[in-house]
Image (spheres, rainbow, N blue to C red):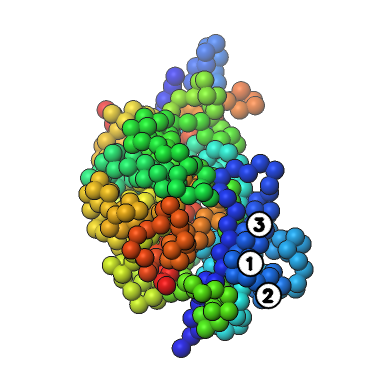
Amino acid sequence: MCIDVEGRHIEGREGATMVQVPVTDGVFTWPSDHPQLIGSRCVTCGNHMFPVQQGCPKCTGAETEEVLLGRRGTLWTWTVQGFPPKAPPYAGDVDPKTFQAFGVGYVELPGQLKIESRLTEADPEKLKIGMEMEMVIVPLSTDAHGNEVVTFAFAPVA
Amino acid sequence: MTTQVAIVGIGMHEFGRTEGVSGMDQGVIAVRRACADAGVSWEDMQFAFGGSMAAGAADTMVSLLGLTGLQFINVANGCATGGSALFSAYNTIRSGVFDLGIAVGFDKHERGAFRVNTKGSGLGDWYGASGLALTTQFFGMKINRYMHEYGISQSTLAKVSEKAFRNGSLNPMAWRRKPISEEEVLNSAMLSYPLTQYMFCSPGEGGVALILARADKAHLYTDKPIFLKAAVVRSRRFGSFEVLAPSIALEHNAGPTVDASKAAFEMAGMGPQDMDIAQLQDTESGAEVMHMAENGFCEHGEQEFMIQAGETEIGGKFPVNTDGGCLANGEPIGASGLRQVYENVLQLRGQAGARQVPNEPKTAYTHVYGAPGISGVTILSR
């Protein structure tokens, strides 16, 4: 299976080209060789926000501008999602027979903010608060048109 | 001098799963039991505040209780719905508008973890689709960080659950009344690391109603009035770490519980050292641990010793969650905060039966916390 950060097309099982579509527009740059999360910055106080929002919760200013967030940071805290989430809203695999536990954490992006994200690592032995993490794009599900739906995650930096 | 407020009647429908009885009906039963406890009838109620998250608009219960024309206001405030109903009733009497009224909360949730309405919570569809819209994850992440910072052990988390189920076994209104050992808690399924199945409470069902009166008229209804010295609700500030947050600030704020607690103690003219017992939000066992410090009852990290030494047991120095808390009672959102007050009234009256705290407690504290980053605190005294 693929963690593909190189492009929008990957080789499917049959060798055919499968199109990757983002879980939503406007949350991360896609397609992109180096995808980034899209946030907001307060014009008045410089506070960073994610996802994009109007209005600043820090200084109550009303004007914000769009900003691309950093791709690397450190793991601030984490857990492991050990049971299938309810669907909806979850779009991934919820079959108890095949469900794979996945990591979830907050990654601190220096000078910006802490981002909640899926983690590519789900082994408690391998997750440590403070470890270096990098943003990647991971497959989530297949939509009605046969496209692979992708979302963002953070992976330990090897 | 503002009017003082007393709780003069309490009623509860059993928590847990009651097949064939709607959430609303459980609320109605709680109201009838509260009226019986105070020796009043529904017709005597001058006002009501009520709410549920998933079991309907509270004010429609007048069709079942009697169309008396009273002022009935629905309250919807996330996990602090019950606490907000009580806050509103408290201030209605304090302001002198009415002399006698009721706060009621009830609920009935589907089985399993809460299904989060991402739109209603101001979150994009992508958030739930990506597998992040689970309140359980927040609790796992908050206690994981806390354990890292303050040296709380897995054993202490399990001991909190063990205590909850032991206390629940002494409570005829509780959902889970079978004691579960620390070892069984640790060996149950790992739901959201480091929290196992028996460290989490479950969404459930139940109803609670509390009748409030001007303190100077309380003797008309009861010979054991319990005085409401403070009722406070606070929302989050910038930098606090809350449930269902796609991001959090780099700056740290201690959160709405600390704010609500300080405001309540100030209102009551008391401090944490003056409290004899407490009911603290225990959505999972780690929450009880963290909330002991956030509410001012110890320093961060001291819980490890306190819980291992049994200080928060019913017979300990500072009993916490004497009715089994959310862990043993489940969490019907609309009723949960009022259940804590119900338990404290029983304890202060000396009517808590097998789980009665010894030495006649005189003061009692409640704390509810939940989505989207809201806390409610009350302080009661005899």
Amino acid identity at mark 3: Ile
Amino acid identity at mark 1: Cys
- Disc 3 chain ID: B
Question: Circle 2 sits in a helix, a strand or a loop, which is it?
Answer: helix
Count of numbered marks: 3
| Apparent side of residue B343 relative to residue A105 in the rendered image (left or right) | right
Q: Which mark is residue B170?
A: none
Counting from the top left corner in percent of width and height, residue B28 is at: 67, 58
Residue at 46%, 74% in the rendered image: B227
Amino acid identity at mark 2: Asp
Could you classify mark 3 by the number of other residues whose Cα lies within 10 Å: few (under 14), some (14-19), or many (20 or more)?
many
Q: In the rendered image, which residue does mark 2 sit on?
A: B44
Q: In the rendered image, which residue does mark 3 sit on?
A: B29
Q: Do callouts 1 and 2 mark residues in contact (Cβ within 8 Å)?
A: yes
The Cα–Cα distance between marks 1 and 3, rounded to whole angstroms, is 10 Å
Q: In the rendered image, which residue does mark 1 sit on?
A: B35
Q: Is B305 situated above or below B95?
A: above
**Precedes in sequence: disc 1 or disc 3:** 3
**Quadrant showing the N terminus of chain A:** top left
**Precedes in sequence: disc 1 or disc 2:** 1
